Amino acid sequence: MKALSQKRRHPLAAIALLLMGLLLTGGLYAVATTVNEAKASTAEFTASDTQEGQKLFEANCATCHGMGASGTQDGPSLVGVGAAAVDFQVGTGRMPMQMNGPQAYKKPAQFNDTQTHQLAAYVASLGAGPAIPAEEYLDEKGDAAKGGELFRTNCAMCHNAAAAGGALTRGKFAPALADVSGKHIYEAMVTGPQNMPVFSDSNITPEGKRDIITFLKQIEANGSPGGADLGALGPVSEGLFVWIAGLGVIIAFTIWLTSRTS
């Protein structure tokens, strides 16, 4: 009996074995994903791009982000953020920041397209991360109806159903998406700038991101067929405005009419 009990498995052995299997599977998946992202991030850059990008980074970005982009108390590490993050932040003028604040504002870009490409090449060389999207996902020829569904499900709670933007907490905000290039919209989805969550390909597929871009560009092109849209606040707010304005006109007319009678 003693020998039999010694051979009997511990009741937690199965759980430990399951956990080891999950950890091994997750590790292999992470390695495979990292390799694929590394190939995607570095395939479009040359060694010259990376060298010139390093010079630009050390002259303009290292003050906040540190040498080697390892981060400082004034700026986070950029190792592993990928080329897409740099292309978005620098291409929209959000970086370098004009001043410290709750959020980086969009402004005219400080670097031209070539310099932005070089900075992206350097940061991409430091660690795998989201790559600059392929042109096939930026052609605005996706399914706008599906894109609208995805946008309302995942984005409208912050950006407004009409992509007009909205306020967040502590002085932050979700910006309006008009006049934003498809490339920058895609990059924002895969990198999650500011308070925005990251929408990886497992959350929204590249085709889904293409559909969202198509939807946004369609509503931007259509404008407001009904006249003034009042900031695209929605039918409830617009109806309330009309109701209050209408009551104001009626009250003003009534006061004028009674003053004339008396």
Image (cartoon, helix red, strand yellow):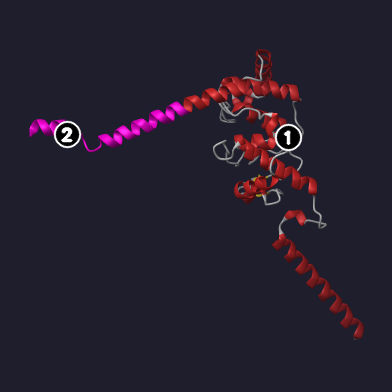
Please give the residue where the numbered disc 2 appears in the rendered image: 8
Quick one: label 1, few (<14), some, or many (20+) residues within 10 Å?
some
In what quadrant of the picture does the C terminus appear? bottom right
User: Which percent across, then down, holds residue 258?
Assistant: 87, 83
What's the magenta region?
1-29
Do callouts 1 and 2 mark residues in contact (Cβ within 8 Å)? no
Can residue 120 be seen from the camera position used here?
yes
Relative to 89, say whether 59 is above or below.
Answer: above
- 10 displayed left or right of 216: left
- Name the residue at 49% across, 25% down: 32
Quick one: label 2, few (<14), some, or many (20+) residues within 10 Å?
few
- Name the residue at 80% across, 70% down: 246
Task: Identify the image quadrant of residue 93.
Answer: top right
Q: Is residue 3 magenta?
A: yes
User: Which percent across, then down, holds residue 18?
Assistant: 33, 34
Q: Dot 2 lies on which element? A: loop
Q: Dot 1 lies on which element? A: loop
Can residue 177 be seen from the camera position used here?
no
- 223 displayed left or right of 152: right
In what quadrant of the picture does the N terminus appear? top left
User: Which percent across, then down, holds residue 70?
Assistant: 55, 24
User: Which percent across, then down, holds residue 112?
Assistant: 76, 25
- Amino acid type, label 2: Arg
Relative to 32, say whether 258 is above or below.
Answer: below
Task: Identify the image quadrant of residue 202.
Answer: top right
**Frontmost residue, 93 versus 18:** 18
- Amino acid type, label 1: Asp
Q: Is residue 28 magenta?
A: yes
- Farthest residue, direction right: 260
Q: CA distance from mark 1 to mark 2?
A: 63 Å
Label for residue 139?
A: 1
